[in-house]
Image: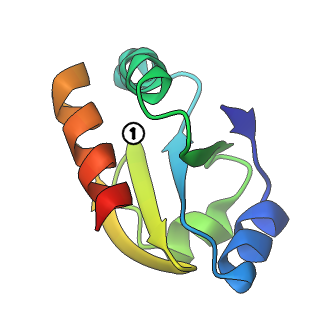
Amino acid sequence: MQDWTETDVQAAAREGDTFCVYAYTPMCGTCQVASKMLTVALELVPQLTIGKMNVNFFPSIAKHCEIESVPCLLLYKEGKLIQKIYAFQSVPYLYTTLKEFLDN
């Protein structure tokens, strides 16, 4: 996962891309665990474009997307935010969710 800026997210949305944004804060222990699980799940879904954002630096995205807590995975389909995932649960759950997201 590459670090994205607010400009990167806006550009991908404007282009009508299908992508995900992993919103986190670096001092959050749950975010660190979720990041590891997401990294493993993404190995199984390499065609998915995903960026990560430290929401401490981009509060306007957090406000615009109405992020309630971190970690949060924002799922964009054709440039529109369609789903937010807060409970990462497990690698199989993330894999299944991301695979279904791409297939629909």
Residue 102: percent from the left, percent from the top?
Answer: 38, 57
The residue pinned by badge 1 equals 71
Residue 90 appears anywhere in the view: no
Residue 71: percent from the left, percent from the top?
Answer: 39, 39
Observer-nearest residue: 47 or 11? 47
State the SS at label 1. Answer: loop
The N terminus - image quarter: top right
* Quadrant of the rendered image containing residue 9: bottom right
* Quadrant of the rendered image containing residue 67: bottom left
Callout 1 crowding tier (Cα within 10 Å): few <14, some 14–19, many ≥20 = many
| Numbered-mark total | 1
* Residue at left offset 72%, top offset 70%: 12
The C terminus - image quarter: bottom left
* Residue at left offset 18%, top offset 25%: 92
Task: State whether residue 28 is above or below residue 16.
Answer: above
Q: Is residue 15 left or right of residue 7?
A: left
Q: Type of residue at label 1? A: Pro
Residue 2 appears anywhere in the view: yes
Task: State whether residue 22 is above or below residue 101.
Answer: above
Q: How is the image coloured?
A: rainbow
Task: State whether residue 102 is above or below residue 52.
Answer: below
Q: Is residue 84 left or right of residue 25?
A: left
Residue 103: percent from the left, percent from the top?
Answer: 31, 59
Q: Is residue 87 left or right of residue 50?
A: left
* Residue at left offset 83%, top offset 67%: 7
